[in-house]
Image (cartoon, helix red, strand yellow):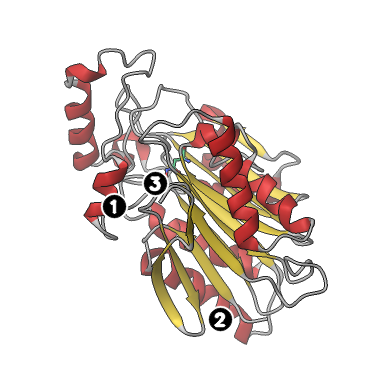
Amino acid sequence: MQPIVLSTWSFGPVANNPAWEVLVRRGDEGGGGGGVLDAVIAGATAVENDPTINSVGIGGLPDASGRVSLDGCVMENPDRAGSVACLRRFANPCAIARRVMEKTIHIMLVGEDADRFAEREGFAPIGEKGLLTDYARGEWEKWISDPRHLDRDKYRGWIPPLNIEEKARSGPDQSHDTVCVLGMDGRGRLAGACSTSGMAFKVPGRVGDSPIIGHGLYVDQEAGAAAATGNGELVMGTCGSFLAVEMMRRGAMPIDAATEALTRITRRFKLGPDHQVAMIVMASAKGAGGHGREWGGWASAAIRPGFQHTITDAGGTRVEPAQRVLMA
Ligand code: SD4
């Protein structure tokens, strides 16, 4: 198999280059258990540590009370998954999620106890003030003082900082959201990582799809990997990533698996104009994403225009639009 890294949005080199370096370096060393997991976490961590990205890690936009909370998960297989939600003092949910997977008998830790776990595991706390950049605080101050958000306690008045049309117009450099990184190493081993600061100005305590196994991310070496970005509530109502992987288990090619999962959302929810979900999907080397065929490859699809993925393979790194858009 040829190594490959596929990530959501146009973080481009920020996510994919460090992931690729780890993947190829490990490949040169003859491969090694966990190399592809190291790679996808390296990609997610680089985005988490970039304060100019306001939807992941340091610099993420805060909740309605002005506090940042971070969610993330990692997965290699149904029996190899870890997750943390509502971290408030640490910048790297994916690396901490890996420790949950490796050091505990559990899959998911949340809230203050997840922060305490990270501390016990030796991660360096950045603190609440460290997570909230001046830019993010400024965006929250604008949001909180906007009379359109008077209904904010019920969350009905929530208006995203950038709507879909603005995103499409603003081009690749502005279109940053949850980072999901899927990777495959030279031996055909898959891994995934997903990291987010969640929906901007969310109700405090809200957790979306990103850290929930089967929703924001699902990986099964026998069937494939899938990850979602966009309005988490839509993904959570349909087990989006799990559904896409199950489609591949039954023989669907990645693009059809992604399309089915997104179509389920469009059929089962009354979508508003700002609703968007996009998915990246990778077939497993074993299941081939179409039984008995060549490796099924990978795909990206979105409900609405504006989504981009970043792909890195032996040919380099490319930022490209979704291969399929349901509501073009
Ligand atoms: C969430 N799915 O918390 C995340 C947000 C996201 O692109 O993906 N934005 O709902």
Report the residue at 36% width, 45% height from top. Answer: 55
Q: Tell me whether circle 2 and circle 3 mark residues in contact (CB < 8 Å).
A: no
**CA–CA distance between discs 2 and 3?**
26 Å
Q: In the rendering, at what x and y percent does residue 324 appear? A: 49, 59
Amino acid of disc 2: Arg
Q: Which tag, 2 or 3, sits closer to the chain's start? A: 2
Q: Locate residue 308: give its quadrant.
A: bottom left
Q: Which tag, 1 or 3, sits closer to the chain's start? A: 3
Question: Is 236 or 144 nearer to us in this picture?
Answer: 236
Residue at image mark 2 = 25
Q: In the rendering, at what x and y percent does residue 302 appear? A: 47, 51
**CA–CA distance between discs 1 and 3?**
23 Å
Q: Is residue 197 above or below residue 67?
A: below
Question: Is 54 or 258 nearer to us in this picture?
Answer: 258
Amino acid of disc 1: Ala
Amino acid of disc 3: Gly
In the rendering, which numbered label is found on residue 168?
Answer: 1
Question: In the shown orientation, is residue 93 left or right of residue 62?
Answer: right
Find out if the beta carbon at label 1 lies less than 8 Å from the nearest ligand 1 atom: no
Q: Is residue 266 visible?
A: yes
Q: Residues within 10 Å of mark 1 (few under 14, many from 20)?
A: some
Report the residue at 26% width, 40% height from top. Answer: 162
Q: Which tag, 1 or 2, sits closer to the chain's start? A: 2
In the rendering, which numbered label is found on residue 251?
Answer: none
Q: Tell me whether circle 1 and circle 3 mark residues in contact (CB < 8 Å).
A: no
Residue at image mark 3 = 57
- Callout 2 secondary element: helix
Foreground disc of the pair 1, 2: 1
Q: Is residue 67 above or below residue 320?
A: above
